[in-house]
Amino acid sequence: MSFVARHRLPLRLLGTAAAVAALVGGMAARSDGDLQSQINASRSAASTLRAAIAAETSKINSTAHGVQDASRRLSALQDQLAKRQAELASVQSSLLAARDHLVVLENRLAGATHALAANLVGRYEGTQPDLVSVVLDARGFTDLLEKVSYLQTMARADAHVVGATRIARAAVAKQATALAGLEARDRRLADGVLAQRNQVAALRAALLSQQLATMRARSSKAAQLGGLERRLTSLERQAAAQAARAAASGNAAVGGIAVNTHGMVQPPSGAPAAVAQVIAAGNAIATLPYIYGGGHASFQANGYDCSGSVSYALAAAGLVSSPMVSGAFETWGDPGPGRWITVYANAGHVWMDVAGWRFDTVALAEGGTRWARGGGEFSGFVVRHPPGL
């Protein structure tokens, strides 16, 4: 896991990707302080991009759920539409059969109507015998009964044809009306289902388009983040190299290098009073044991951990007001190496260089005292110093 992933600071997000791009493109190391400022700004920009990528990923997941829901609705509507269309085809088939039957009945009705009309015309023109003529022309009573019976039979037949035809016509007309209404209703339903299907299809297309756009945005931000992390790695390497060079040169910027007399470091001539106070406090606890959490509940303790040791020594010169954890030193003081005192911190460890001497609990494990010449970890540490020192 990289240093950036293990030791993130709570930083404010930058406003836009344009600001991030400008930051990445415009950074150039000019001094120790500038370099550390660029590292902090790079971390802030990386945090911004990670948050933006997470937001885009959340949008993609949300859009994917919307696409799935739209697809399910579309499938259900298509099934409903298929059923409606099958029902509509059955209705239309029945309607065609009913219409054919109606044509047959209407043809019969036309023939019966024509026959009735001919009978009426015949009676009017006198070609058809009426009851009086039948009585007068009858040849006896038997002939009379036969002719009267024939006339009654003809009349009943005519009445039956007319009545049956009228009933059939009314029934067919009613059936045709009902079927037409059913066809219109199913057509409206089918049109409605089609409209819904089109709406869901349009929604699905829109969601897919949004998902693609979001994925493109996330890909772009991921590419920016990759470039920024490479830039950050380069800056951290530069900072580590500067710190290593400063340590190797014995802190050449200092007016003099502290000396170690019988295991106790003495400030060099001309060192500020604060530096002498820090060294004196460091001497006081230099050989005390390492105790995890030591020096945090109170400055007075039987042993000190790394941040407790550094806090104790700096507090003697009034540079800190209370014990600090190692991660807090990442934002303490000013960025970059100091002239007299340089602090190296991350979330897991902190140590410092004072007038060319390393004050470090790691040195305690190596030589029995927190003071040592040279060594120390530089890679992955934030470099800070007290203002003015």
Image: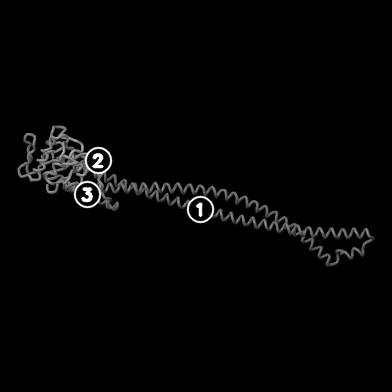
Question: Element at badge 1?
Answer: helix
Where does the N terminus fall, quadrant-wise?
top left
Give whichever of discs 2 and 1 has the lower sequence position. Answer: 2
Q: Amino acid at mark 1?
A: Gln
Judging by the rendered image, the residue that carries numbered circle 1 is 196
Crowd rating for badge 3 (residues with CA inside 10 Å; few <14, some 14–19, many 20+): some
**Above/below status of 252 relative to 200:** above
Q: Residue at x 6, y 34 (%)?
A: 262
Give the number of callouts.
3
Verify CB contact (< 8 Å) between mark 3 and mark 1.
no
Q: Is residue 119 above or below residue 223?
A: below
Q: Amino acid at mark 2?
A: Phe
Say whether residue 2 is left or right of residue 333. right
The amino acid type, in three-letter code, at marker 3 is Met
Q: Nearer the viewer, mark 2 or mark 3?
A: 2
Inspect this view and state whether residue 242 appears: no
* Mark 3 or 1, nearer chain start: 3
Residue 269 drawn at (x, y percent): 4, 43
Q: Which residue is mark 2?
A: 3
User: Is residue 193 shown above or below 350?
Assistant: below
From this view, report whether residue 349 is shown above or below residue 113.
Answer: above
Q: Which residue is painted at 90% across and 63% down in the image?
A: 134
Please name the residue that numbered disc 3 is placed on. 27
Which mark lies nearer to you, 3 or 1?
1
Badge 3 marks a residue whose secondary structure is loop
| Color encoding of the figure | one colour
Element assignment for label 2: helix
In the image shown, does 94 or 355 lie closer to the viewer?
355
- Residue 41 place in picture, x, y as percent: 23, 48
Q: Assess disc 2: are there few (<14), some (14-19) or many (≥20) residues with their C-alpha within 10 Å of its C-alpha.
A: some
Q: CA distance from mark 2 to mark 1?
A: 54 Å
